[in-house]
Amino acid sequence: MIAFARRAGAYLGWIGVIVLAGTMPALAATDAGVKAVLVTGASSGIGRTIAEDLASNGFYVYAGARKQADIDALNALENIEAVKLDVTVQEQIDAAVLQVEAGGRGLYGLVNNAGVYIGGPAIDVPVEEFQWLMDVNVFGVYRVTQAFGPMLIEAQGRIVNIGSISGIGSGQFFSHYSVSKHAIEAYTDSLAAEMEPLGVQVSVIEPGNYDSEIGASARARMLEKNDEYARAGSPFAESFQAFLSRDWDRSKYKAPDEVADAARHALTDGAPLRRYLVVPSESEAAWTLGTMATEMVQLNQWQAYSYSREELVAMLDAVPPSDTAKAEITAMVHYFLENSATEEAHEQFWAEDLVYTSSNGTRFGKADILQGFAGSETADDDSDSLPIVYSGEDVNVQVFGTTAVVTFRLVGTPKDGSEPLEYFNSGTFLKRQGRWQAVNWQATVIPPGDGGGEG
C-alpha cells in the first residue's frame, strides 16, 4: 500500500487518486527519513561501487563484508555502515537483521551482489567446489532475501539481484558459474511474481566484463586446486592449463560505474525494469542478445508447433509495447503524484476529452479539474494539517495495445480516527501521438458493509 497526504483544495473532494502500489516505491517512506539499502559483497568491485554510489545519492547503506579490514574501510565512508556478513553463514545473516532493525530506518532496498567464480571442466571439478560456489551465488541470495523479506515488504521496497551475461550464455569451463547465474534469472522472475503484489519490485542486473577482483580470486583458487580441477589423464588437462594462463587482470576493463547506475535506477525509478543488460561494449551486447536469439531458434526447430520466421518476428514485435506501456504509465503516474500541487502535472495527466465520474454520479471534464485546481489552496504543503491520508490497494494494470486500464481501491483514512472512506476507482488511458493520458475515470463508493465507509 502506498499512502500519501493529498494537497488541500476544493478539487480534492472529487478528483481520483491514482496509485500503482504494485509498481511504485512507497512514497510515504520518504517522509520517514533517508531510505536504507543493504548491499552484500560490498568490500570491492561492483559491490563497493554500488555502495558508494548509493551513499552519495541520498541512501543510507548497510555494506556487507567478511574481513575486518574491509569493515573498517567501509565504516570510514559517509552514509555507510559496515555489516559483518558472510552470506553462507546463517548466524551472521541473523545478526545483520538485528543490526538493521536496531538502526530504526527499516530496509527499503536489498542488492544481492555477493558472488564468487570458479571455472573448469564440468566432468572434473569436484562436487564440493561446485557446492561452495552455489552456496554463495544462489543459496546466499536465497538466505539473505528470505531473512530481510519481511522488512522489504513493510517498506514496499526494491530487490536488485546481480546476475551476469554468463547467466544468459555460457562456454568452455564456465558451466559452474553460468549455472549459478542462470539460477538467479529464474529466481528473480519467481520472486517478482510473488513480491510485486505486495508492493516490492524485483530486478536483475546482467553485467558484462567490468573491473573487479573476482577474476584474481578465482584464478588463485583454481591454481591452488589445479590437480582437482583437471585430474590426471583428463582430456581437458591441456586446455585447462591454457585457460589458467590467460590474462586474468580485470583492471584493463572499465570501472563498474554503469552497473551502479543500473542499480540506482532499479532502486529509485518509478518504473524499474525487470532486467538490466549492462555491458561495456557493443560486442558484448551483440553476444548476449545473439545468444538468446539462437536459443529461441533452437527451441523452435523440433517442437510440434514450430513458428515461421514471420510469426516469430510478430511475437517479438508484440512483446515490447505491453512492457513499455506499463513502464510509461507508471512513470507518468509517479510524476503526477509527486507534482500533484502543480497545474502542469494535471495538464499532462488528463486528456482534453476526459470524462470523470464521481461517486455521486456527477461528471467533470478536464477544464473543471483545472478550474478547481486554480481555486485550491495549493500553497499549503503542510501534509500534517490535512484531514485525510489516502492510499491505494488491490491495484491492477492491464495494457491492450494503445489502451490501458487501471483499477484499484482508494482508501481515505481520516486523522480524527473516524471510519475510513473507501472507493473503487477505475481509469482508462489512451496513447495518442506517442503520449499516454487518462480519458475516463470513475469512482464508486464502497458501502460500509463491504469494508468501506460512507462517502
Image: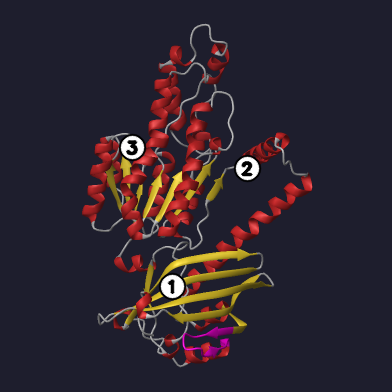
Q: Residues within 10 Å of mark 2 (few under 14, many from 20)?
A: some
Quarter of the image containing the C terminus? bottom left
Q: Is residue 357 magenta?
A: yes
Q: Secondary structure at mark 1?
A: strand
Measured Cα–Cα span from mark 1 to mark 3: 39 Å
Q: Tell me where residue 134 sits by quadrant.
A: top left
Q: Residue at x 38, y 48 (%)?
A: 51
Compared across the picture, whether 185 is left or right of 169 comes to left
SS at mark 2? helix
- According to the image, label 2 marks what residue? 285
Out of 348 and 146, give the one closest to the viewer. 146
Q: Is residue 153 above or below residue 401?
A: above
Q: Amino acid at mark 1?
A: Arg
In the image, residue 364 lies at what x, y percent? 54, 89
Disc 3, SS = loop
- Give the number of callouts: 3
Residue 222 image point, x, y percent = 44, 20
Relative to the observer, which residue lies in front, 29 or 364?
Answer: 364
Residue 398 placement: quadrant: bottom right
Nearest to N terminus: mark 2 or mark 1: 2
Side of 380 relative to 278 (left or right): left
Label 3 belongs to which residue? 87
Name the residue beneath numbered marker 1.
409
Boundaries of the magenta span = 355-366
Please give the name of the residue rendered at 24% of the width and 37% of the height, measured from the top-left corner: 91
Residue 267, numbered circle: none
Please tell me whether residue 193 is drawn above or below residue 226 in the rendered image: below
